[in-house]
Every structure is written in structure tokens, then in C-alpha cells.
Amino acid sequence: MGEWLPRRARQAPRSPPAPRRSAPLHRTMPQPLGAALLLALLAADCSQAVLLRAPEAAQFLRQRQRRAYQIFEETKQGHLERECVEEHCSKEEAREVFENDPETVRTAQVAACIHKYGSPYTRSPDFLTCVHSKHFCFVYCSEKLTSVLSFGADIDECKVQHGGCNQICLNKLGSYRCSCYSGYALKDSKTCEDIDECAASADICGEARCKNLISSYECVCDAGYRYDEQRKTCDEQLCEQMCVNLPGSYTCHCDGKGGVKLSQDMNTCENIIPCVPFAVAKSVKSLYLGRMFSGTPVIRLRFKRKQLTRLVAEFDFRTFDPEGILFFAGGHQDSTWVVLALRKGRLELQLKYSGIGRVTSSGPLINHGMWQTISVEELERSLVVKVNRDAVMKIAVSGDLFTLDKGLYQLNLTVGGIPFKTKDLIVPINPRLDGCLRAWNWLNGEDSTIQETIKMNERMQCFSVAGRGSFYPGRGFAIFNLTYTQPSSGNETKTSWKIEVNAVIQPATDTGVMLALVTEEASVPLSLSLIDYHSTKKLKQQFVILAVEDTVVSRLALNLCDKKEHSVDILLKKDQLSLRVDGMEGERELSTSELEDSLSILESSLQSAVKTYVGGLLSPHLDELAVRKTVSAH
């Protein structure tokens, strides 16, 4: 969708000259013009005369005129191969190929090389070196039609006002061309216009109406119909997304994980709108310690010094979590190191010097969610830990955390985890800490790269506002490995099972999963969800539903999206099922025999390992459930 543009308009065709021979040509030129061009040549070198033999003089001093050695050649654009092989090439032929003066050799510059090294027809290496030093390129033609084609460096017209092209400018040797983006075509040599696919092809959409768009088109069917791209037909559309067939009826469902739910007409989908504002703003000057589920450090630093240096660490800290690791400092597992952690809401220091490990804990409860300043300082023979500038621990030590290795004193420092397995600590601990750091200072501020890294990674940042409890903003969930079975009393070969959940919730949307059990095969034997419609009754209303696999076993009509806290309690065991919200009992959806069958299915699933999901289902294997139940990750 483009054409090549000549750089300069051609002159009108002239009468072709007589065919040239191998003998030199002598032409008579008007005296004033000949004298002017000769003076131009002499000006190339003021220190010495420029004398050219007849063939060379004839090449540069004759009046330019068009030649045609083929029929209709004067109507063609100059072509390098044709000019060089089919004709006796010269500067004039070069001018026909490149169609502009800047890219054709400047006579005076080449004349200086001819004067110094003789005719170019001799193919003297010194002559070629002279010309190349002036940034020219010489192309020789066939041996029988020996001549020289000289031209300067290519000019990229696309760099100047985009070559006048409306969309795409493509440069080439001696010329350029305009082109267009997909869906456009050249209106003239430079301007692009939209292609109307609907007008170009009448049956492009088959049964549907064709709607032209900028650089594209769309096939549109009447309301209630969906376009089939393969067959180009409009088929009746019962549901906008997923349609589930039922005996004598059907139900529609929307992909809640895609942020949509069933609309009022029970066929189409609409966006899930939060009923509670999300406090999801984050601070780029903070570091979240609990980003890694495995307790892997979120920051790793290594310090090297020529002289012995002592550890100095200070930072602001906030958490509601009672247990986890703040930072590690030292060498490797078998060398000298210290770990500052939190256990039961108080600071704990584990340290290892000279192969001997110790654990000490002291100070106030600090998992109250308020910011406090914590510091650790290595003195000559002791470690001092402070909370809000008050010393809470002072431990005598014999050794240094910086260790000498290959002539340098070195120290490893990791934040939010340790560089070895937690079972190898003096006292094992759950390393993942749901906490936040800010205003940190490791070894007097020698960690400038940390802040830049955090700015580029939102997941490393903390929420600006935090409150007690768990928050699931729709892009994450919590997973627990819980066992719901135990041996029956008096009979170890049989097992009993029980699922009991008590929670206080404040839903942010009226659609979503609160809790789900998931097997290793990615089936969902139990789920507790919020939903805002009754699929079989075609009723738009807020419900809390409890389901075993894809069967709803209990339902309670209640509006929970009201910015208030609500208590939710469920109890399931072999012969009992209960769903209660704010003390109100849910209605059973099944008969006694049907309920027994559903509980038997649940019991069978619990004999194998299951994972307990809280706050959403984001596993790619669970998409079908998410669509079927219209749940989102909120």
C-alpha cells in the first residue's frame, strides 16, 4: 500500500543523442557556458591547474540532456542496473538514477582525484582511495562498457518533516516512499485514508450488518443475537456469557473473576461495583515484609569493608502479626549471625557466636498496628536493641558480625527472612511477617538502591492505611492446609469429620467467594459465597449460599453489602448442616435424602488432602467454578 516517490521531478524528455562509440566524443558547446564550467573545475585546486583529457572533459562539460537507449526509456525512472549494464554509464546516468544533485558526484571534487591519479577508466587503486576519502562510492559497469558511476552519501528524506508522509516514511537509496498502517491505503502519493471494508466487500459480514471503524470494521447483529465469525451468521443469544441448560429451562451466568455479574434482565452481564470504598493506596517509601509466602527474604544486601565495621540498623515498624522475622545479619549458617524476630507480639533475638546459640526476648507488645522505631547496634562486646529509643535488650557477645574473607570484612543482611531454612534456627519460627518497614537505615544509609527497587515494584510497597484483620482486595487470597477428619473414638479404622467456621466479615461487593475447599484434582467440594440473584427463580436478590460441589444446599436472603460487620457461622458434619448469618438460620434447598447424598460426597472428598481458600479463588484450574457461581475474587 505505497509507491516509491522520485526525489525530484524529471525534466521533460529531450531528443535522444546519437549512440555513443568507444572513440572519444568531441562536442561543441556555447562559449560562455563552456568557459563558466571550466572555471568551476579550475577552482577545485587553486595551487595547480586542472587539465583533463578529452574523454573526461566531455563527461563533465557537455550540456546535460536526457538520453534514451531503449524505447520509452525517457518515461522510466532511473534504474542503477539498467543504466550501468544496458548503457554506457556516466555522471549523467548517475543523475538519472538518483534524480537529485546532492547524491550525484560533485565534479570539482572528483576532478582533483583525476588530476592527481589520472583517468578513472584505468581503475587505479590510488584513484579509488582518493575518491573514497572524499566519501564517494564508485561502481563499475561491465568490462566492455567500462565507465564510472559516482555519487555521494544517501540523504534520508524521512528525517525532514517525515518526508511529507501522512503515516509511514520508508527511506531507500536514492529515494523514499510513503506507506500506511494496517486498515489504511494511500489516497495519493503521501496521504493515507481509512479503508472502508464494508464498501470494498459487500459480504464480508455474511448475515450481519457491517459497521466500518477506523482502520477496522465490526459485524453487528440485532439485539438478542450473537455473530458467529466462522459461519458469518447471527445466532440467537440466550445468555451474554455462559448458558447452563436445565430440563425445560436454562440459566445464565457471568464470569465474576472478570469483574462482571448478571444484570437485572438475568441474561446480560454488568460490572461488579464495590459497595465499600477500597483503601488500596500504597506508599512508595515503605517495604512490605510479607510479600513472599515461603518466608524468603524480600531484600538481600552484602556489605564489604577494608576495615572492621560494626552493625547499625534502625527503622520504623508496624504490624498486627504476632510472629515473623524482621531481619538477619552475619555470615552463613555455621558462622556468626543474629536474627531479630517477633514472637507472641514481642521482639526476640536469636544469635550465634563461636558456634554457641542463644535466644532472648524482652520489651513491650508491639503488634498493635502503630508505628514504632526499632534499632539494633553492635558495640565492642555487646548488642543493644531499642524500641522508641528505650533499650529493651542488651546482650553480651564475644566476636564480630563482620567476618574477614579474602582480605575484606563482609556482612550479609536479609530483610523479611533468613538465608537458610528456618528449622536450622536455634528455635524454629514462622518466618513470614505481615508487617511494614519505613525510614530504614542499614549501616548509616549505605543502601540507596533499595528505595529505587521498591519504587518500581508495587508489590513491595505497603498499604498506606492498615487495620486489624484480613483484607482481600480482589487480587489475592489466603490458603490454609487444614485437616477436617480425625479417628473415631474407640475405633481407629474409622474417621469422623467436622467443618466449623466462625467469621466476622464486612463485604466490599455483593458477589464473591468467602471460603472454599479445593482438592488436589481442583474440584470444589464446599464453598461459601455471596451472590445477588436466584438462578432458577430468575430473581434478582442478595443471598448467602452454601454449596457442595455445584449444588446449593443452604441459602439465606440477606443484604450484607451495607458497610457493616456481620457474623457468619457454618457447621457441617455427617448428619448435620447449618448456615447462620447474624443469628439467622439459612433455608435448606434439598430434601433429607438429597442432603445426605451431598454430605456423603463432601465426606468422601475430605478423606484426601484439601486446601482451604479464604477471600477468593484465583487458581487457573478453578475458572469453571468461578463462572458457574458468578464469583469474583473480591
Image (cartoon, rainbow, N blue to C red):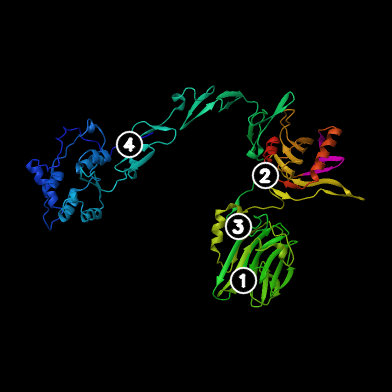
Crowd class of label 2 (few under 14; some 14 to 19; many from 20; radius 10 Å):
few
Give the quarter of the image for residue 93: top left
Q: Give the residue pinned by disc 1.
A: 311
Q: Which residue is mark 3?
A: 286
* Circle 4 Cα neighbour tier, 10 Å, few/some/many (<14 / 14–19 / ≥20): some
Please say if the residues under marks 4 and 3 sit with CB atoms less than 8 Å apart.
Answer: no
Counting residues from the start of the chain, the first of labels 1 and 3 encountered is 3
Label 4 – label 2 distance at C-alpha: 54 Å
Say which residue label 4 marks. 4
Closest to the observer, 149 or 210: 149
Residue 564 percent across, percent down from the top left: 73, 43
Question: Alpha-carbon distance for marks 1 and 2?
Answer: 43 Å
Which amino acid, by three-letter code, is at mark 2? Ser
Of the residues shown, which amino acid type is indicated by label 1?
Answer: Leu
Q: Circles 4 and 2: CB distance less than 8 Å?
A: no
Q: Quadrant of residue 63?
A: top left
Q: Nearer the viewer, mark 4 or mark 3?
A: 4
301 over 592 or under it: above or below: below
Name which residue type carries label 3.
Ser
Left or right of 430, for residue 215: left
Q: Which residue is mark 2?
A: 619
